[in-house]
C-alpha cells in the first residue's frame, strides 16, 4: 500500500498544476482520463467555470482556519480526481483554501484517478470508483491516517434518495446536486474534514 501511495504522490499535481493541466487539455478539445467524449469535455468546460467562480466566493471560517493551524502534525491531502467530475469541481476549491489557511499544516496534492487504478481500487465507494477521494497522509509518519469522499453527507443522502425513489442518475439529480452545493457554500466539506483531522490520534 505504501508504495502505491508513494507512486501516486510522485505523479501528483499541485492545485495550480492540476488547473493548468485541465485547461491545457480543453484547448485541445480533450478532458483528463482514459475515456474521451464530447460530453466529458463539456463537463470539464462547465467545471472550469464553476471552479473559477468558487475560487472567488468560497470562504473558510475563522474557526476552521484556527483549528487547522493548530493541528499537531503536518499532513498531505492526496485527492483522486478528474477534470470532468462535477463533485470534484465543487470540492477541490474548498480543499485548496483549507490547505492555504492551514499555515502549511496541510499540503494539497491531486492525482488523476485513471492514472492510479491501484490506489483507486483501495478506496472504492460501494464498489464504485467514485471521486473525489481525499486520502489523508501523516507527513511525519508517512502513513495513511484517514480518507473522505466522494461527497459530503448531505449530498450523499440526496443522491441515495434519488436512486431509491427515481432510479438512475439523470439531468434532474445533477441539477439538484449542484443546487445543494451552491446552498451549502463548502461548509459541509470544511466541517466534515475538520472533524476527521481533529479525531486523528
Image (cartoon, rainbow, N blue to C red):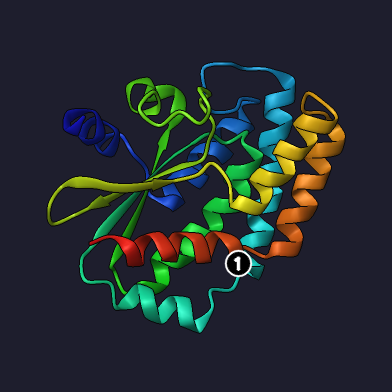
Tell me the quarter of the image containing the N terminus: top left
| Residue 70, percent from left and from top | 29, 78
| Quadrant of the snapshot with the C terminus | bottom left
Name the residue located 60 percent from the left edge and 67 percent from the top edge. 187
Q: Which of the 4 image quarters holds residue 195?
A: bottom left
Crowding near pointer 1: few (<14 within 10 Å), some, many (20+)? some
Q: Image check: 65 left or right of 157? A: left
Residue at far front of view = 164
- Could you say which is closer to the camera, residue 171 or residue 158? 158
110 horizontally vs 22: left or right: left
Front residue of this view, candidates 68 and 31: 68
Number of numbered discs overlaid on the protein picture: 1
Q: Residue at x 33, y 28 (%)?
A: 119
Q: Quadrant of residue 87?
A: top right
View extreme (left): residue: 141
The structure residue drawn at horizontal position 18% and vertical position 33%, both measured from the top left corner, is: 2
Query: Where does the image place residue 32, in percent across and percent down from the top left?
Result: 54, 28
Name which residue lies at 50% across and 31% down: 125
Q: Position of residue 157 (x, y in %)?
A: 68, 45
Q: Secondary structure at mark 1?
A: helix
Residue 186 against residue 175 in the figure, above or below: below
Q: Is residue 30 above or below residue 23?
A: above
Asked if residue 24 is positioned above or below residue 122 in the image, the reply reads below
Residue identifier under label 1: 187
Amino acid at each position: 500500500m505504501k508504495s502505491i501511495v508513494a507512486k501516486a504522490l510522485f505523479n501528483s499535481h499541485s492545485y495550480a498544476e492540476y488547473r493548468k493541466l485541465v485547461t491545457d487539455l480543453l484547448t485541445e478539445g480533450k478532458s483528463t482520463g482514459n475515456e474521451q467524449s464530447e460530453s466529458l469535455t463539456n463537463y470539464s468546460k462547465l467545471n472550469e467555470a464553476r471552479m473559477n467562480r468558487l475560487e472567488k466566493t468560497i470562504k473558510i471560517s475563522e474557526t476552521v482556519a484556527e483549528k487547522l493551524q493548530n493541528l499537531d502534525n503536518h499532513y498531505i491531502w492526496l485527492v483522486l480526481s478528474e477534470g470532468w467530475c462535477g463533485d470534484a469541481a465543487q470540492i477541490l476549491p474548498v480543499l485548496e483554501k483549507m490547505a492555504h489557511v492551514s499555515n502549511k499544516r496541510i499540503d494539497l496534492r491531486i492525482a488523476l484517478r485513471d492514472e492510479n487504478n491501484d490506489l483507486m481500487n483501495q478506496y472504492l465507494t460501494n464498489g464504485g470508483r467514485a471521486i473525489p477521494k481525499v486520502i489523508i497522509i501523516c507527513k511525519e509518519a508517512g502513513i495513511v491516517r484517514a480518507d473522505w469522499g466522494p461527497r459530503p453527507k448531505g449530498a450523499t443522502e440526496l443522491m441515495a434518495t434519488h436512486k431509491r425513489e427515481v432510479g438512475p442518475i439523470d439531468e434532474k439529480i445533477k441539477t439538484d446536486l449542484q443546487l445543494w452545493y451552491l446552498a451549502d457554500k463548502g461548509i459541509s466539506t470544511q466541517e466534515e474534514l475538520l472533524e476527521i483531522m481533529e479525531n486523528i490520534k
